[in-house]
Image (cartoon, helix red, strand yellow):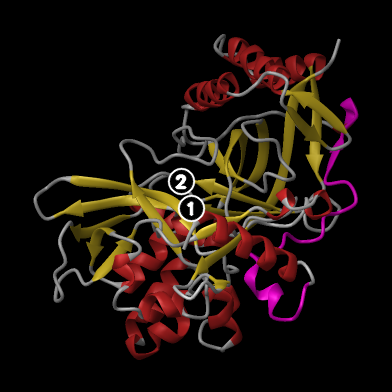
Amino acid sequence: MTKRVLRKWLALFAVGTLLFSAGGCLFFSKPPEEPIQQSLVKLSEKQFPTFRDTLANPDLVQALEQSIHYYGKIPGDRMFKLGKNSYPASHLKHSLTFFLKFIQKKPSSDELTLFIRKYFDVFQSQGRNGKGDVLFTGYYEPSLQGSLTHDEKKYPIPLYSFPRDLVRVNLPRFSAKYKNEPILSARVTPDNQVLPYFTRAEINVRKDFYLQAEPIAWVSSLTDRFFLEIQGSGRVELDNGDVLRVHYDGKNGHPYRSIGRYLIDQGEIPKEKMSMQAIRAWLKANPHRQKEVFHHNPSFVFFRKEKGGPFGSIGVPLTPIRSIATDRSVFPRGALCFVETSMPPRESLDSATDQWGRVSGFVLNQDTGGAIKGPGRVDFFFGNGSWAEFAAGHMNHSGSIYVLVVNNP
């Protein structure tokens, strides 16, 4: 099929899809939730929170430097929206460098609060309900046992690279009136039909899928691969002692559907006991239903090999507890934020979630996620290891989030 014919078919397909027939809607990723009228609201000084940092990881400087590096790589005049306000990247970079210079003096909480009151504007997210309530969840970097070669008994499950036959159609390029539409994922068949890309169920049953998406490694179970997809990146510990870092490289374009919600709706796990660990335990106890549950989520993630990381959506290494993922249509990429929520004690692996202590502190908006939509969702990156897995698997707490930017003179 020539590129000319491909472009012709893609144009015709995109126009047909934009008519929003019942079938056409299924080709799109899940649209973001309807935004609250004003997602981020500028606070008066009297409304500022107390800026006390109690987060367990002291590496705030490292996280700040990563966001500063990001702003240094993009045009200084690129604009970022903050509620009703807009700021160029150069101003957000200045906000971070100014803040970094001050905290390197190791100020007290009172000194820091006075500093922010004098020099910064503070915007609060209106959250899920328009009253500032934000749901905090977590993710981490898992470790999997695996191999670079296929072993049907020990390592039968492939981690696929991005498929050669997956085509991205950027609908706004066809017409400005479709500027808010997501990118369409499609494939072109040998007889020149343009179809939605394969679902998870279709990928899992295709014996020849490796011809389009070369496996970069092999792991032991569908469960391990599924949770790696949810986290977005991880470490594959190879039999020879080496460690392979794998990172998110795209998805098939189908909507993400929560298997946790599915198991709650099926009456398999009570809502109050839902966690990543609870899902793993249920899947282990019900191996005959694994495919049913996994195939409830048609979205599928592809990976690439990478040195270092894990990297966030702005291309910088994530810092445990100091990096968060948000909806980039609401929160400016790379921005300095302040959060208030609950978190388990460091190294605690059995603390009840209703006994987690309240924490607050400064974080950087350095990542995003398919399930993190709207002003009322924030995902904490917890790093790797047992505590990170426990915290990420059980994190489901309300709180508040604020965005800080140096005020205009």
What residue sits 11% from the left and 48% below the top?
Answer: 241
Kindly identify which residue carries mark 1.
139
Disc 2, SS: loop
Instruction: Please determine whether, in this image, residue 147 is positioned above or below residue 94.
Output: below
In the picture, the quarter occupied by the C terminus is: top right
Callouts 1 and 2 close, C-beta under 8 Å:
yes
Residue 114 in the image, given as x and y percentages of width and height: 76, 16
Amino acid of disc 2: Phe
**Mark 1 or mark 2: whose residue is earlier in sequence:** 1
**Residue toward you, 22 or 318:** 22
Residue 31 in the image, given as x and y percentages of width and height: 71, 63
Q: Tell me the crowding category of disc 2: few under 14, some 14 to 19, or many 20 or more residues within 10 angstroms, Cα based.
A: many
The picture quadrant where one finds residue 87 is: top right
Instruction: Please determine whether, in this image, residue 131 is positioned above or below residue 108.
Output: below
Kindly identify which residue carries mark 2.
382
Amino acid of disc 1: Tyr
Looking at the image, residue 57 sits to the left or right of residue 398; the answer is left
What residue sits 47% from the left and 47% below the top?
Answer: 345
Residue 70 in the image, given as x and y percentages of width and height: 55, 26
- Residue 348 shows up from this direction: no
**The stretch drawn in magenta includes residue 83:** no
What residue sits 48% from the left and 53% below the top?
Answer: 139
Magenta residues, dominant SS class: loop
- Residue 129 shows up from this direction: yes
Disc 1, SS: strand
**Span highlighted in magenta in the image:** 20-46
